[in-house]
Image (tube, grey):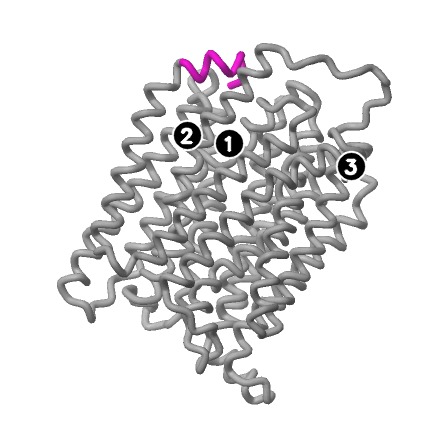
Amino acid sequence: MPIITTVVIWACWVAYGLWGLSKHPKGLNPLFFTEMWERFSYYGMRALLLLYMRLPESAGGLGLSLPVAGSIYAFYTFFVYALSVPGGWIADRFLGYRKAVFVGGVMIALGEFGLAAGPKFLFFAGLAAIAMGTGLLKTNCTSLVGMLYEKNDPRQDGGYSVYYMGINIGALIAPLILGYMAQDPAFVKALASLGLGSYNGWRMAFGFAGVAMIAGLIQYSLRQHVMGDIGVKPGGKVDHSAEPLPPLTTEERGRMWVVGILMFFIMTFFFVFEQAGTTLNLFADDHTRNTIFGWAFPSSWFQSVNSTWLLILAPILGFLWVALKDKEPSSPAKFTLGLFFVGLGMLLLVPPSLAFTANPVLKVSPMWLTGTYLLHTIGELCLSPVGLSTTSKLAPPRYAGLMMGCFFFAIGAGNMLAGFAGGFSEKLAPATLFGGLFVITTVMAIVLVVLTPKIKRMMGGVH
């Protein structure tokens, strides 16, 4: 039944995504599916990574202490995004965006196979390869989306929303499939009956993530012709003129400063949002009753709840922004809403945390985490796709890859902070941790409200 449900959800949303793709440049299609399978690889592995590292060696894990596992997770998730800066620069100056995407995908697949191999040295080498590969692929695939549209094309925001749907289709199905392979007793028993040993469920899941990335690369390679000449050479679209580039204007420099300012708020948002892979993952594994109507499910399946909510809510919020017309909030205002909702999601977990602190054997209802992910998803829809589109609009064309890399660097910094929080969460009462995260995001939201008028002036008319 879980597999059938997964296939039905996946098929429905791929159909919806294809409908959205039909209204945009044909080149969006291969980029949509490349990113979908890359995110399948990443989010499936992310759902398992911390749990696998702290799992005893006798059960097939690495047997690391939680602080050590959390630190490894922190640095890994930081570099996955932080390497987007050199990844964008390499594409800007040397490889070109399209070649950088392909090379990055190959490195990701090889890295996943390293995780699946078993030995610790290959595990850590695999993490390094995935981080470097993601730095090349994710930044430049996202930059290519912006290059599909001419200046002032009103479809660009919608194109990024469709592209973001591809991200979340991959993020939705990955924990369901890979979590089932790693943690479901029936699948593990089937492996054991084949003489593979129960511990191989985790490594089988990592290997399948690598296969998914290869699938993404195959369709990307076969569909190169529909992207025209964008991203073939360093610097974005092919420029057939030999005229030297003029210096940056005052307005362009101001817009680049806006990107830099917004990075601090993006980092704060993802510091809290990416607790999904650390403290919220541990909350699900240790303190949540992972059953519904008497049916038990793996704790890693909670990693799909965010994407499920997103795919439900994305069309609603998209319709809302269009319906508001001239009253649609500015990008900084949407960032403020994102910070508010992600903090509110953490505040929701304070009451159940107080309950199981008073009674350590208590397992709380899965509805608490489901509600938190609902609020986080609303915040994500207000900030993340808007951030992608805003960065693309504000970046001077010659620095498109580098500026998009800065966006992902901020996400990486937030991931690193989330990893450290997960590693040291045992030393802090859960209610104190979640309440503190709410306070941090609320303060940052207020700061952004104060800065918004100045930021809007610096944006030079970009909404």
**Residues tagged 1 and 3 counted as in contact (Cβ below 8 A):** no
> How many C-alpha atoms fall within 10 Å of the one at disc 3: few (<14), some, or many (≥20)?
many
Residue 387 numbered tag: 1
- Amino acid type at mark 3: Met
Instruction: Return the disc, 3 or 2, that comes first in the chain's sequence.
Output: 3
Please name the amino acid that badge 1 sits on: Gly
Identify which residue is drawn at 25% across, 44% down.
Answer: 436
Q: Is residue 455 above or below residue 237?
A: above
Nearer to us: label 3 or label 2: 2
Residue 376: % across, % down: 38, 44
Q: Residues within 10 Å of mark 2 (few under 14, many from 20)?
A: many
Using the image as rendered, state which of residue 433 and residue 246 is in the foreground.
246
Say which residue appears at 50% left-offset and 72% top-offset: 182
Of all residues shown, which one is farthest toward the left?
Answer: 358
Judging from the image, what secondary structure is the residue with disc 2 in? helix
Q: Are marks 2 and 1 in contact (CB under 8 Å)?
A: yes
Range of magenta residues: 454-463
User: Which image quadrant is residue 451 in?
Assistant: top left
Decide if residue 226 is on the left or right side of residue 201: right
Q: CA distance from mark 1 to mark 3?
A: 24 Å
Q: Amino acid at mark 2?
A: Phe
In reply to whether residue 282 is colored magenta, the answer given is no
- Queried whether the magenta region covers residue 460, the answer comes back as yes
Position of residue 376 in the picture relative to residue 26 (left or right) = left
Verify CB contact (< 8 Å) between mark 3 and mark 2: no
Q: Position of residue 308 (x, y in %)?
A: 46, 51
What's the mark number on residue 227? 3
The residue pinned by badge 2 equals 335
Query: On the rendered structure, is 430 left or right of 320?
Result: left
